[in-house]
Image (cartoon, rainbow, N blue to C red):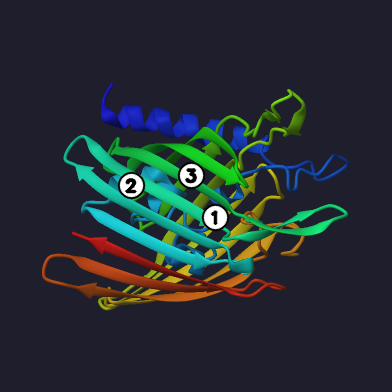
Amino acid sequence: MNLRKISLTVTISLLVALPLLAQDLGPTVLGGPSKVGTATAQFLQIGVSARATAMGEAFVSLVDDASAAFYNPGALAIIRQRQAMFNHTTLPAGIRHFFATYVQPVSQFGTLAISFILLTTGDMPVTVAFEGPTGETFSASESAIGLSYAKMLSNKFSVGGTVKAIFQDFAGFDERAVAFDIGTLYQTGFRQLRLGMSVTNFGPDLDFGTQKDPSGKVVFDSQSFPLPITFRFGVSVDVMNRENSKLMLAGTLVQPNDNLRYETLGFEYNWNDLLFLRGGFKIDEENDPDAAGDTSGFSENFSAGAGIKMAFKDFNGRFDFSWVNQQDLNNLTRFSIILSF
């Protein structure tokens, strides 16, 4: 079987299987129980790219840089240079979120990537019911380390996957788990029209387990919660392609397992492959950003941002910035740096 037949088989299989899987991800909207707030490890849903978040994260089909390790591992296969990426976000309540990844193309073998996500809360006061603060403090952190592999199965179709180890630590209680991502990218060759799909954070439930004191008495017994499995399907297209300016439009349908389905729309204007202007909008089931469409735990609706590319002797760099409307919370700003060499 040649590569064309293989890619066609994989494409058809994913087109059939992933939407069927997505039907089981979302909550029952009519006459059934809501699944909002039922998944743990929500840090895995927080955007890791200023470029992506500026576009409302309508990015699963458009991504062509190192952030593909997070949004769509299948798109890693189209990266032709080594890349390193760093992203930082300060969230409400002093929570800090970091992302870093390195991408290494390996000739005909494919493309490898390693990524790291970290969320930290800083110190918080310990408070006991009916007694108040104790004077002690505790902290919480969540992290994930991922290893990705992607390959072009034809000159238009690529597939990739990620296996990641997840770590959670809350006031001395810790848990570990393994999760998987899979993604595909199809480049039609017509006006840069691209189709992208991904399923992320597929794995077993997380459970902090049971802890006992020296006498054998149970002092802590936790309940297990599922990971935030998310299905994404997106389309992007080049609507303007002139000598010194380009305009890309993108849309993505997102179905999380712990919230309502929502859609995102975004654009990116490219001037001379030097300056970039971006904008995005998130549309949920009821057009209410506080009721749905909030996969990261924070309300988001409008977003905007910009980027600038810089050329140096031995490498190229791009600096991206995004602003995201947070409704009732402080607006979010993100900063990302990507180095290609």
Name the side, left or right, on which 287 lies relative to 60: right
Amino acid type at mark 2: Leu
Residue 50: image location, x then y, percent? 45, 67
Residue 206: image location, x then y, percent? 62, 34
Amino acid type at mark 3: Met
Amino acid type at mark 1: Thr
Q: CA distance from mark 3 to mark 1?
A: 9 Å
Question: CB under 8 Å between callouts 3 and 1?
Answer: no
Residue under circle 2? 76
Q: CA distance from mark 2 to mark 3?
A: 13 Å
Residue under circle 1? 252
Residue at disc 2, secondary structure: helix
Of residues 163 and 221, which is closer to you in this image? 221
Residue 74: image location, x then y, percent? 38, 43
Q: Is residue 130 above or below residue 149?
A: below
Of residues 303 and 212, which is closer to you in this image? 212
